[in-house]
Amino acid sequence: MDDLDNRLIALLRADARTPVSSLSHHLGVSRATVRARIDRLIDTEVIQGFTITTGSSAGAGVRAIMMVEVEGKATETVLNRLRGYPEIRSLYATNGRWDIVSELEAPTLEAFDELLRRVRQIDGIAGTETSILLASRKRT
């Protein structure tokens, strides 16, 4: 994955229904390039599906925070892999024991369990700690 792939994924995460012509305009490349990139990202399972974002009243499913410890200098490699998971809502670099903090959302416990399994198999991840989010106590 390169910078163009990451920018393309970011645009699709914001709105997976964005037309290829709009994506190509935003990225400054041809529609054929965008289409080829999307096809390759799907074929290599970097993009594993397209989804929608709903309000909290639509039943968000299982939400959690995952802290990730990265081996050595693998942070960028790990971040690039994590960016491709649609269930990962946000990623943050941090300091201290954990290198990355991510916000996760899965529709069911089974899907959540599968997500954790896939994330933990990423090369460069030394360890994780995950906390399921329960009731919200304050909204901004």
Image (spheres, grey):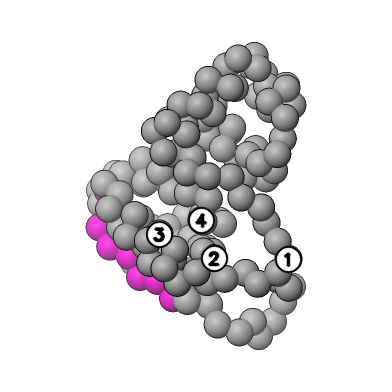
Secondary element at image label 4: strand
Residue for point 66% across, 85% down: 137
Mark 1 and mark 4 in contact? Answer it, CB < 8 Å. Answer: no
Crowd rating for badge 3 (residues with CA inside 10 Å; few <14, some 14–19, many 20+): some
Q: Residue at x 59, y 32 (%)?
A: 8
Q: Amino acid at mark 1?
A: Gly
The image shows residue 16 at horizontal and vertical percentages of 66, 41
Q: Secondary structure at mark 1?
A: loop
Q: Main secondary structure of the magenta part?
A: strand
- Using the numbered discs, state the Cα–Cα distance from disc 2 to disc 1 in whole angstroms: 13 Å
- Give the alpha-carbon distance from disc 3 to disc 4, as whole Å: 9 Å
Of the residues under marks 4 and 2, which one precedes in the sequence?
4
5 or 112: which is nearer to us? 112
Is 129 one of the magenta-colored residues?
yes
Q: CA distance from mark 1 to mark 4?
A: 16 Å
Q: Which residue is mark 4?
A: 88
Q: Give the residue at mark 1.
A: 55
Give the image location of residue 74, x and y in percent: 31, 44
**Mark 4 belongs to which amino acid?**
Ile
Q: Left or right of 27: which side holds 69?
A: left
- The disc placed on residue 107 is 2
State which quadrant residue 20 falls in. top right
Sequence-wise, the earlier of marks 3 and 1 is 1
Element type where label 2 sits in the image: loop
- Residue 115's disc is 3
Which sits earlier in the primary sequence, circle 2 or circle 1? 1
Task: Answer with mark 2 or mark 3, whichever residue precedes in sequence.
Answer: 2
Q: Residue at x 28, y 62 (%)?
A: 127
The N terminus sits in image quarter: top left
Query: Mark 3 or mark 4, which has the lower sequence index?
Result: 4
Q: Dot 1: few (<14), some (14–19), or many (≥20) neighbours within 10 Å?
A: few
